[in-house]
Image (tube, rainbow, N blue to C red):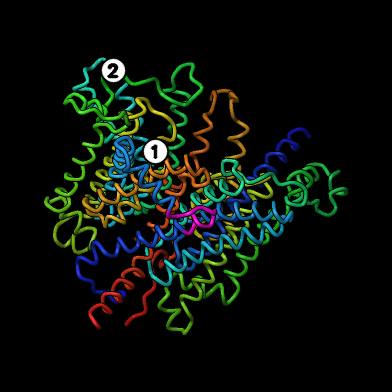
Amino acid sequence: MSAAPIDLPRWADTALVPLVSVAAALVVAGLVVLSIGESPLEATALLLKGSLGSLEGLGFTLYYTTNFIFTGLAVAVAFHAGLFNIGGEGQATIAGIFAALACLWLAPLPGILLVPLAILAAAAGGALWAFIPGYLQATRGSHVVITTIMFNFIAATLIVYLLVEVMGKAGSMQPETPDFPKQAVLTPIHELLGAFGLKLPSTPLNTAFLLALASLVAVWALIYRSRLGYAIRTVGANPRAAAYAGISPARIIMVAMAISGALAGGLAVNEAMGVQHRLVLDFTAGYGFVGIAVALMGRGHPVGVGLAALLFGVLYQGGAELSFDKPTITRDMVVVIGGIVILFAGALDGLFRRLVASVLAVGRGG
Amino acid sequence: MEIVQTLAVILDSTIRLSIPLLCAALAGLWSERSGVVDIGLEGKMLIAAFASAVVAYHSGSAWAGLGAGMLAAIALSLVHGFAAITWRGNQIVSGVAINMLAVGLTAILGNAWYGQGGRTPNLEGTARFAELELPLVGAIKEIPVLGPIYDIAISGHTAPVYLAVLALVLTALTLKHTRFGLRLRAVGENPAAVDTAGVSVAGLRYAAVIICGALCGLGGTYLAVSQSAGFLPQMTAGKGFIALAAVIFANWRPWPALFACLLFGLLDAVAIRLQGVVLPGIGQVPVQAIQALPYVMTVVLLAGFIGRATPPKASGLPYVKER
């Protein structure tokens, strides 16, 4: 009982199918722009100029890219184990709480100790919030999808409670923690390169971007070059075969979820420690969900995730600039594009594979 | 008599808060009983809330709004069906896409059309559903206990509330006592058997997702055109997911779904009432704890610590004919 497999050359499968589905998604987005009476071409030009046309725009683009790399990798690692982690938002929220606690409690420590500890705390928080759903699926049979959805909401109510009642800054009307100590703040890239004599405009881009790039490499090594990665992919492909091969699917599910959650914690590192320098409500801002689009578009491979994250970084920054010039096109456009990419590259994958396959067949004269 | 009054008022707000949950839960129940998992209930309610508010505003008719809300939600349902049934795509992925599409589209269109940060203009007069007074209120009102409950809690709701109750009864009867209902349940348990009997699996599943869309439409319309006077960005605020939890709680059965929705609605009503209130012996209960309760309870239930959740056997699995 399996669907008739559609055979595609490897290059078409890994590059052409995602490209075609993303192109189709952009066309649909263009239609939405048309329907509200704006020119899609003009919008695209403004978008590209705003995101890549200046060093400042590029800095913002890469800052958003950082968030999408983390959430995209989180979803991708779970995908390899055959799991669908929709809980990136909740995991990043808990990671933010852990990082804030570390930054505030360990404030006397010097930066060289405090920063790594706070990053580890964020990873641990994210990992914990993903491990529990993984544990419940592995041992109690409750599905990760539903549990992670519920955990998103539990995390959302928890952070409101903590920021309003427990960790909130005294005298502030905003639900936010006091500012983190200075040495807990990640160095902005323009300051880092400024030390070498390079003058860059001030942007939120910070060293969390380097951490994201390192995570891309680390996830590649983990998934494709390590024993654990092999076990993860085997469980994802066929849990029963994995069990016969002596791999415990239950253990791999828990480990993969924990790694996935830890990666989602990177979002909190970039936002709380890199940009806001305190914990604010709703800092996850939907990045976790867009991460699903990033992972699907990138076919779960770190190179693809990196490129897809860059695309969404461009859309996010370009969209912000665009909405200055064209107030009718708000940044919600990115959410629409994300949704269509998820639909086309994820759920309608079969349709696009069929399309690409028939076009290729025509090209070969078949 | 004071306490009866209070109880009736709490029951009244419980019903008001449960109705959107009930609509979405019934919607999810139809879809999932046919084997199509739907985590896009939230998005469909949101798009329905938006479409109904827009049409009700321009036409001045709440009923036209209801029609538009249902059509908008059915349109998204068909997208889900196209991906999940025709192309056998991943149903979770499709549901996530639908939720994001709804959030983005309603915000963009609302902002582009009305420029009020995504809100639609205020609905007035016939553009909103009027409160209906049930028959015999005048006579029954004077009866102790029952009277106030009938007067305050049961009577005086708007048409969508009574439509939702009607939908519940029809859902329960159709699923249990009709041939269509039997086949629909069968297609969620063992589609191959239904196929062997010569009934179209895809046809039944499409019927189920369309009904699902119509019910989400009712729920979304209630939010925008009855409970509020217009659309607000993200006004569904997770209700589609609480409904999903209610379906699980009810073990995919209609009447228990009503009680699950009433329970979650009651929690919501209590949370609003308890804001800032200090309870003797307990102290101040954080509102967030009550708000998180439905989610926590669902996790605990799914993990099998209380009762056992048994979803339809074929739910989430695309059907492929044996070749």
Chain letter of disc 2? A
Percent across and percent down for residue A180 are: 33, 21
Vertically, is B264 above or below A22?
above
Q: Quadrant of residue A212?
A: top left
What is the x, y in percent for residue B115? 59, 43
Q: Residue at x 42, y 79 (%)?
A: B193
Left or right: where A316 falls relative to B247 = left
Q: Secondary structure at mark 2?
A: loop
Picture quarter containing residue A348? bottom left
For mark 1, what is the residue? A284
When the figure is inspected, residue A112 is found, relative to residue A245, above or below; the finding is: above
User: How far is mark 1 from mark 2, CA to CA?
Assistant: 24 Å
Residue type pointed to by label 1: Thr
Residue B157 pos. (x, y %): 73, 49
Residue drawn at (24%, 82%) of the image: A365
- Whether residue A148 is visible to the viewer of this picture, yes or no, is no
Report crowding for label 2: few under 14, some 14 to 19, many 20 or more residues within 10 A (C-alpha): some
Q: Which residue is disc 2 drawn over?
A: A107
Asked if B40 appears above or below B191 in the picture, the reply is above
Q: Quadrant of the C terminus of chain A?
A: bottom left
Most foreground residue, B280 or B95 = B95
